[in-house]
Amino acid sequence: MNTPDFATQRDALADVVAIPVTPFTADDTLDTAAHRALLNRLLTGGIRTLTPNGNTGEFYALSSQERAAVLELTCEVAAGRSAVLAGVGLDLPTAIASAEQARAAGAQMVMVHQPVHPYVSQDGWVDYHRAIADAVPELGVVPYVRNPQLGGQLLSTLGELCPNVIGVKYAVPDATRFAAFARDAGFERFVWVAGLAESYAPSYFAVGATGFTSGLANVTPSLSLELLSDLRTGDYPAAMKLWERIRPFEELRAAHQSADNVAVVKEALATLGLCRRDIRPPSSELPGEQRALVAGLISGWRT
């Protein structure tokens, strides 16, 4: 077994963590050619951390075979060019099997989707993540925290049990709660990734995040990377000027409890001729008037 390079993995999280879309053909199968082209476009554009099987990739709408195919293609394209943070989740045996697949495919890390269960106890949350982390001790493990009821002490406990839990994707829309959670967990122990993309990146960076997730990067990697650069240097006036440009696009994605989160990104990519706009239920394609709005928003954006 190779010695885990957690320092390199931590560095990869303190960056723009892009969540690639999953393109489909007219027959509702994976569009491998378009997917490969989009991944290459992200990497050529300067992105160095990819999350296959994230929510922008329609994780919950893919079959297990499709999730495996998405993982393998991403690892193939990214080999030697970027880190891969593979999304895993669902029931515990499936999550563990997916983490083991990620290791075999060449991913360096796994992001654990929030457990899908109506009854998530505090201890059960720790047990779920510990079982996954223990199954792949050489991979960095990144819990995806969306539940505002979870306290930082839970993560502290998990970190003591599992040295390979190296970072957190925090996606509760409350910067004050994030700041408290991070410090209760052990601020220096973990890498803190703002999990609500560019919209929340400035406020979360102000209280300690060092990376942020991005679906926008599918459309224009340069804007996401420019925002990261401004935040790293503490140039908040420049960051907020850029934030204002991005804001209408991200507000469309966040509207109606993020109902069109992926549809907006795929619409932008379709407008650019990079993939089809097809999206699977329970999401749906944008209506005509919103398609025109997306086209207007991205016109003139450099990619």
Image (spheres, rainbow, N blue to C red):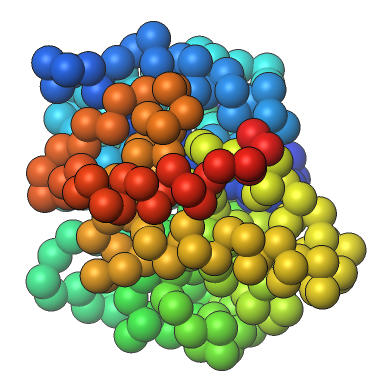
Q: Residue at x 49, y 64 (%)?
A: 248
Residue 191 screen position, x and y as percent? 65, 61
Front residue of 181/159: it is 181
Instruction: Check the image and report above or below for 290 versus 126.
Output: above
> Can I make out residue 297 in this image?
yes
Front residue of 24/49: it is 24
Q: In this image, 108 relative to 21: left or right?
A: right
- Residue 67 location, quadrant: top left
Q: Residue at x 32, y 45 (%)?
A: 291
Q: Residue at x 37, y 23 (%)?
A: 275
Instruction: Check the image and report above or below for 209 versus 173.
Output: above
Position of the N terminus, as image quadrant, is: top right
Residue 229 screen position, x and y as percent? 81, 54
> Can I make out residue 112 in this image?
no
Q: Residue at x 63, y 75 (%)?
A: 204
Q: In this image, 61 relative to 290: left or right?
A: left
